[in-house]
């Protein structure tokens, strides 16, 4: 089909070593792909983003207001991870830049790590292994327990929490959970009315909350005090949800018998920087460098999922999976021309578009409009050729943020 400009003029910049499947997906589509295994600083990205239409990052590269201001051609940002905290979503929205992520692609990887750590901590496997590495032979059943029959408390019953619930139950654990939103329990899992109930009842507590600001220091001294003595504590969610000094105190007092932590309030910006934490050297504590979702399978899934959504957005205008724009889903169109208009959410925009088209006797064959508090997204299909004057008038709409002729 005829597009607004040749696909080989679409420039894609992929950073932080995203999976090769993503590179190949964009190349197969005919886009011009630039790839780097490294993250970029804000100043470096400001220079590199000029002339780029699609930007792909992971968790270390930050998309700030300054970066957005410098992005003169940017249509879409792909976050090849779950979270989007590293992206100024509002700045992107107000410039008409769609942001896509991969909220489900590494779910299984995180869950499998949690399951493995639960078993290792309950059995003190990590401690026994460390002793053998120091030539210490300590064969004992002390501090070693089966997971069967124990109570797993899940705080945050989203995609990861639910799948963890199913696998833990298959191992014979009783599962209880708390979530601020109403969630359907899977299997025999039981919902609790408050987080405090989960903390008091569980033998193992696993956090799977999102990056909402209200989750800052969700678990601190008061929360640890409500837990059972000898509890196993796991945080594979977000670094800022746990007060680390409070966790260390709980470990030293015996309140927490074992802990596994994958995320930290402050993390090294690269593999070349040292890691420093009060948790280092704590007994029966498994520390991992934010690798919960870092498996080859997960990265491959992400490498296919994110490009597919971006390519669909560029080729059809559909952005149903975008995290920052009103969700509009339309079918590909071969027998009509399509106008895409992201605009400020003010009254009369659709009427203004339709009046312009009516003035030139353009027949509308399909139209979709969705809005949120700040912006609207209007897709309009017409069945006859257009002229430059029509495009000039559509681009001149006062509320316009971004206008694109698709084909």
Image: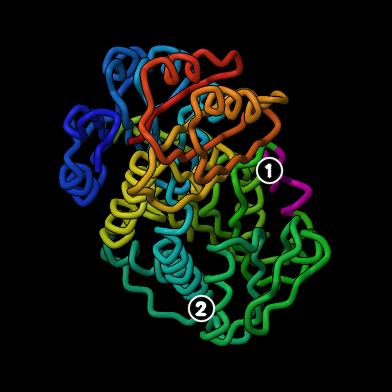
Above-or-below relation of 282 to 258: above
Q: Secondary structure at mark 1?
A: helix
Tag 2 residue: 167
**94 within the magenta span:** no
**221 within the magenta span:** yes
Question: Which percent across, then down, holds residue 115?
Answer: 47, 71
Quadrant where the N terminus is found in the figure: top left
Residue 170 in the figure: left or right of residue 246: left
Q: Tell which of 304 and 246 is nearer to you.
A: 304
Magenta highlight range: 214-224
Q: Residue at x 53, y 74 (%)?
A: 143
Tag 1 residue: 215
User: How far separated are the C-alphas under marks 2 and 1?
Assistant: 26 Å
Question: Which percent across, then down, holds residue 146?
Answer: 53, 83
> Colour scheme of this structure image?
rainbow
Res 332 seen here: yes
- Disc 2 crowd rating (10 Å Cα; few below 14, some 14-19, many 20+) is some
Question: Which percent across, then down, holds residue 31?
Answer: 19, 36
Res 36 seen here: no
Quadrant where the C terminus is found in the figure: top left
Residue 38 in the figure: left or right of residue 339: left
Of mark 2 and mark 1, the one earlier in the sequence is 2
């Amino acid at each position: 089909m005829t597009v607004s400009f040749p696909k080989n003029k679409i420039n894609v910049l992929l950073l932080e070593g995203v999976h090769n499947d993503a590179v190949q997906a964009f190349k197969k589509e005919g886009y011009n792909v630039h790839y780097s295994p490294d993250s970029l600083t804000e100043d470096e990205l400001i220079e590199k983003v000029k002339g780029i239409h699609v930007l792909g990052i992971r968790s270390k590269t930050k998309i700030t207001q300054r970066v957005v201001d410098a992005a003169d051609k940017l249509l879409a940002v792909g976050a090849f991870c779950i979270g989007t905290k590293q992206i100024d979503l509002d700045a992107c929205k107000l410039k008409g830049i769609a942001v896509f992520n991969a909220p489900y692609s590494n779910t299984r990887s995180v869950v499998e790590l949690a399951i493995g750590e639960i078993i290792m901590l309950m059995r003190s496997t990590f401690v026994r292994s460390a002793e053998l590495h120091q030539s210490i032979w300590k064969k004992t059943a002390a501090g070693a327990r089966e997971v069967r029959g124990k109570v797993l408390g899940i705080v945050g019953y989203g995609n990861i929490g639910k799948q963890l619930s199913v696998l833990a139950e298959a191992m014979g654990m009783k599962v209880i959970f708390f979530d601020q939103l109403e969630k359907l329990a899977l299997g025999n899992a039981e919902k609790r009315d408050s987080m405090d109930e989960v903390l008091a009842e569980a033998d193992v507590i696993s956090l799977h909350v999102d990056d909402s600001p209200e989750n800052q220091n969700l678990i601190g001294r008061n929360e640890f005090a409500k837990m059972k003595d000898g509890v196993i504590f796991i945080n594979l969610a977000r670094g800022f949800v746990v007060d680390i000094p409070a966790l260390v105190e709980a470990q030293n007092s015996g309140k927490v018998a074992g802990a596994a932590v994958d995320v930290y309030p402050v993390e090294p910006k690269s593999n070349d920087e040292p890691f420093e934490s009060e948790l280092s050297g704590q007994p029966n504590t498994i520390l991992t460098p934010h690798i919960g979702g870092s498996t080859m399978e997960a990265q491959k899934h992400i490498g296919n999922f994110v490009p597919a959504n971006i390519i669909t957005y560029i080729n059809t205008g559909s952005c149903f999976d975008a995290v920052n724009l009103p969700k509009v889903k339309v079918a590909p169109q071969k027998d009509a021309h399509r106008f895409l208009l992201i605009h400020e959410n003010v009254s009369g925009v659709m009427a203004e578009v339709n009046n312009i088209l009516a003035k030139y006797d353009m027949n509308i064959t399909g139209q979709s409009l969705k809005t949120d508090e700040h912006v609207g997204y209007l897709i309009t299909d017409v069945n006859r050729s257009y002229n430059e004057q029509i495009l000039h008038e559509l681009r001149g709409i006062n509320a316009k943020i971004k206008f694109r002729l698709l084909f």
